[in-house]
Image (cartoon, rainbow, N blue to C red):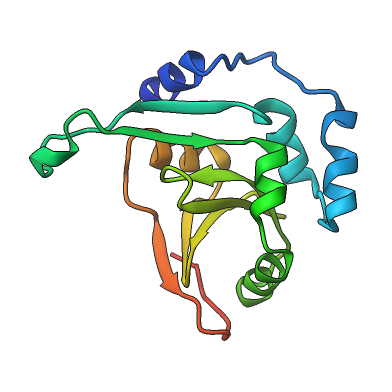
Amino acid sequence: MNFSETSLQILYNGNWTEKRLLPNEQFLDKYKKAGYTLHSSAFDILQRFGDLSFSFPTKTKGKHKALEGYIQNFHFNIDRTISICDKEDIDDFGKCIGTILCPVGESNNRHSIVTIAEDGRVFAYQDAFISLYGNNFVEAMDVLCREKQPIKMLIYDGNSLDFSV
């Protein structure tokens, strides 16, 4: 994975290494019991990043002074993610996008659920908003670590959603 320098620094600070691989049994049964399809894209990310948390000071340049000292965080905590996700919502959002989504973590200080699609795209949702964070995990990490805007954000209304860009 070819992460940006900013992303790598945040990942290393969160105790991630390139050689990290969680044992399968640490998460396979949990996803199966919760009824999720753990496709290969999600499996790969969970093996490498599962149960890690990342935080960093938010960028304040050009932002309101009240954000000074604000800490941004995201995580791939398997137990927490499974416990707070509504499987029906995940399934509905996946159908609207045209893929199977698997929840893998939270972003925006636990305000958004991060999911991985079968094709490797990374989506997040909060309330009725679904965002495409990246067409792959490296792009998504750049959005998260560099506080960039999502590639595309749409409002979920029960109809099909087109995330082509």
Image point (67%, 74%), residue name = 92
74 left or right, relative to 97: left
Relative to 102, residue 63 above or below: above
Image point (66%, 42%), residue name = 80
Q: Which is more toward the observer, 108 or 20?
A: 108
23 left or right, relative to 19: right
Image point (12%, 35%), residue name = 61
Q: Is residue 68 visible?
A: yes
Count of all numbered marks drawn on residues in the image: 0
Give the x, y percent position of residue 158. 57, 84
Give the x, y percent position of residue 126. 47, 62
94 left or right, relative to 125: right
Give the x, y percent position of residue 69. 22, 28
Residue 153 found in image quarter? bottom left
Q: Which is more toward the observer, 152 or 84?
A: 84
Q: Which is more toward the observer, 85 or 146?
A: 85
Relative to 145, residue 87 above or below: below
Q: Quadrant of the C terminus?
A: bottom left
Q: Can residue 3 be seen in this view?
A: no
Relative to 145, residue 116 above or below: below
Image point (33%, 35%), residue name = 146
Q: Quadrant of the N terminus?
A: top right
Relative to 104, residue 20 above or below: above
Give the x, y percent position of residue 101. 69, 59
